[in-house]
Image (tube, rainbow, N blue to C red):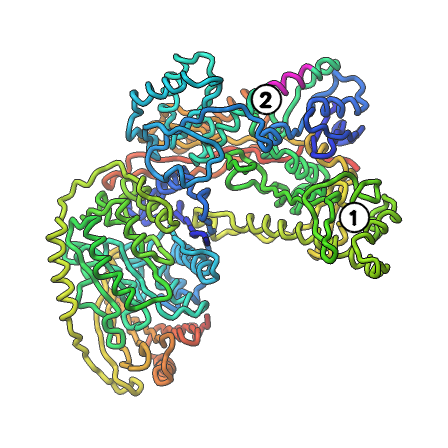
Amino acid sequence: MKPTGILFFPAFDWSLGETHPEREERLLYTQEQLFEEGILDLPNIQQYAPGLAPMAEVLKTQGIFPSPQAQDLDAHLIAAGSALVLGEAWGKGDIRNGFALVRPPGHHAGATVLGNRGFCTLNNEGILVNYLRTHFGVKKIAIVDTDVHHGNGTQDIFYHDPNVLFISLHQDGKTLYPGSGFTHEKGGPNAWGQTINIPLPPGTGDEAFQYVLETWVLPKIQEFNPELVINSAGQDNHFTDPLASMNVSAQGYGKITELLKPDLAVLEGGYSIEGALPYVNLAILLALAGQDYTNVREPDQPRRPHIPLKTLKSYVSELAYEYKQAEPQWNVRNELYLPPGEWIYLPHSIYYDTEGFQEIRHDRVRRCRHCGGTVFIESRRPPEPAKFALVRIPFQACPECAQAGYDLWDTLGGRYQAVLLQDQDRNRIEFWQADQGVTAF
Amino acid sequence: MAGRVGIDVGGTFTDAVLMQGNRILDKAKVPTKPNHLLETIIQAIDALKITGKQALEQITVSTTLVTNAILQGNLPPVELLLLPGSGVKLESFPWPISYQILYGTIDYRGREINPPDQLEWQRLLQKLHQQKNLSHVAIVGKFSHRNKSHEEQLAHYLRRAFPTLKIALGHQWGQSNFYRRSLTTYLNLASNDLFGQFASDLEQAVAARGCSAPIFVLKADGGVLPLSKIRPVESIYSGPTASVLGAMAQSSPSQSFVMIDIGGTTTDLGLVLSGEPLISSSGAKIGPYSTLVRSLAVRSVPVGGDSVILTDGSNFSLANYRLGPAYCLGGPAPTPTDAMCYLKLIQYGDSKRAEQVLASLLQPETRTPEKLRALASSILDVFVERIVREINALQQEWQNEPAYKVWGVLHPHESLNFHLWMSGGGAQGIASVLAQRLHTSVRMGKYPEVSNAIGAAMARPTFSCTLHLDTVLRQYRIEETGEQGQWQGSKRPHKAINGFLEEIVQREAQEKGIVLMDLHKDPFDFFPIVQGFQTVGQIVRGAFHVPPGVIGRVEE
């Protein structure tokens, strides 16, 4: 049997602040636990060394503004690059599955990046998915986000992508950061239903998680029939997590992994660095490697109020109903400068909690029956006047959408400070800056 | 100037050199008697012309004693008692030996989660009482390198019932890895009596020859320690280690090369990077045992100059054994050395006999000179291919070393210019083929036949002292010795920690009877410990070490 790949990159010299949850200590005890357990001596576990993500792979997925040089990316490039190392090993068939146990996390980082939010700057899974599509011809991908926080960044990146099924299970956005991830967020006009949000009430535990997976998530994945399943393996559903209020145990996480059978898992959040992480990481890794995780026990017991399975079942059936009922309301705006076609307009704003500012976004997607549709995003950070733009021609783009993308790219230059062209289909990534002209990646 | 003797016990021959400073005064080679290693070593010493034995300053031995005992399974029974707590099930690992599980859990910071079970200990005692020949017990707990109390309590309990029991505790192997710690503790205890007997016999035999020089033993990590200070299991794999050191002693400092030692039945490989040998990032693996024994990253390929060539009439292959010397040197079977001899790559051997034995591998009608040359070349190509495969794997191991810090990933290994450095009996004959295959130059010392003995004679002591300090729990530990103690200093020490560790370093060096040359300090890592958004202390990790090296360079 092929081995399970592990890439452990704890970034022991990187933090967002000495007492910040995302600090050097975060994976220290996980290292102690994994190394003391001798996991690298288990048959079928193969360790990989971290790598740096090439900027072309990053920009294929995310627009970094005002420019990649203007953001502090070092640690993030390693976390993303490490996911790519495992992705390559998977793509080549060297590993059966893999776990990128890396810091910093990424699932709050979206299609545009003006700074760090929710501890994330680069979206490790997003970059990984598009890398595997480009280099290994993978076409259909499912991403299941089991972090307690809504995977809003990943959702943003793949919202218009009919070939990516994104499912996020998280503590209800009414009670937790980032305050999004409701059932009616179901995807853009060309990918309606490809985003599924399952907000769960505080106190949800092992059994309930298992129930939701078995009755909702797994059937959806089966129906979609992806070539690749990725798990955003946040660990803050644990009953000791200081930032959230759920009740999942280490063995519960082992069970989640066993049920999801992800090809690649990437660590996301999880800030109970003593009470949970050493045990949860171990359970996930063992489950991936097909080893017995039933002896992994954290020392504490859940003390939070517990939601009875019966209550949760009726809550979930209501959610499922809400999800089913949600209907799209598209706002069509065919402005004169836009290339031919029907452009759906989706304005929204994004809060960057780490630095405390707002990004104003005007997203437009070309409605298309043949492909994911060209996406055009305008971004700015008020009160600064500078505007940035991103043009994305999706994987497997139809000729009309590709043409629309290039028409946009040709006309946008003078009106923005920087414009990024993401021709995912032809793997052509170009970045135009007012003061530097075009850089090809 | 006082002399030094280096002895390397190989599978076929035992080499010895007598050196004075950087000069070789004498060398000797005697056949190895695998079941009489002591006798072999004494014969090698006797074969050297040593005048004024009192003036010898050091005898260094690289011996296969423990390696052989482990690989042949000649070890006394040891009762292995494990306290694995929670976590990975023990059955998930391949265990070459049996064990008993006991209750009790320590966590990653050394806190007791569950105390041991006294009733269980009483039952254990009854069971042990019924056992005949109970003499050795190894006790190993998960996270005992953070807190040794369960191991010590159990040892104390058993000693009261069995006062003469030989007990080894796992925390003395203080690196992380419970599985390897268990096997290492077991192997070290199991080889202790054997090695102890060997050590005292060797000391007596040397003393009986009027020599009072201290005897040192070469370790797997390339260092030497006095006979009485070495932990027996650390003496494994000293052969390839001696080859690496021998190459270093015959090269200029700061060079990068692949060491290739072509022996009779095995070819050993090692990697030297800018003058420092690559250390294996996990620990030595010997037979079915994964250990915590620090060792150079070396590899053995089971082919050598005397490997027998097998044929099924149309194809040939290299066996992983020898039947004696090469046919061209009077041996019984065809070998790569015969191919070297036929192609005139070596200056020794009877080329008529080489031709004769190579011809025997071909069908009678195809025994033309062209076919013979082609056959000889392809034998060497196969030999070289086996070596090249392992060289690539070794370089891959170096490239794939994990990094856990941003700095480490942003500053990857510089690309180095490697040459090949060859030693051993078969080196001459294969050098040109290897050089061609790898497009690089080959260098060879002046004494390829005693290179390992030179390595033993010139090896310096290595040293490593790694601190793990938890200022909140006020506990410090030293990885290499298993020392655990109370930290009296501040919660956030900075400069003080340096002096604290330096003191331990000096004490340890004195205790081991070694002089520290070229002591390096690894950068310390300070991890703030945060509780409820308050920094309450630190975990500090840091180390001093002396990398493997040689005390001089051989004068040609």
Nearest-to-viewer mark from 1 and 2: 2
Q: In the rendered image of this protein, does residue B425 appear above or below residue A223?
A: above
Residue A138 in the image: above or below residue B349: below
Write the residue at 49% across / 28% down: B186
Query: Which element is circle 1 on?
Result: helix
Q: CA distance from mark 1 to mark 2?
A: 39 Å
Majority SS type along the magenta span: helix
The three-letter code of the residue at mark 1 reads: Gly
Give the extent of the magenta segment. B197-204
Q: Which mark is residue B429?
A: 1
The residue positioned 28% from the left and 35% from the top of the image is B536
Name the subunit of mark 2: B
Q: In the displayed structure, does residue B332 sit left or right of residue A40? A: right
Q: Quadrant of residue A369?
A: bottom left
Residue A39, quarter of the rendered image: top left
Residue type at the position of mark 2: Leu
Q: Is residue A66 visible?
A: no
Q: Which residue is mark 2?
A: B194
Quarter containing the C terminus of chain B: top right
Q: In the shown orientation, is residue B50 left or right of residue B242? A: right
Tell whether position B20 is magenta.
no
- Which element is circle 2 on? helix
Q: Percent from the top left, x then y, of residue B322?
A: 73, 41
**Camera-side residue: B29 or B514?**
B29
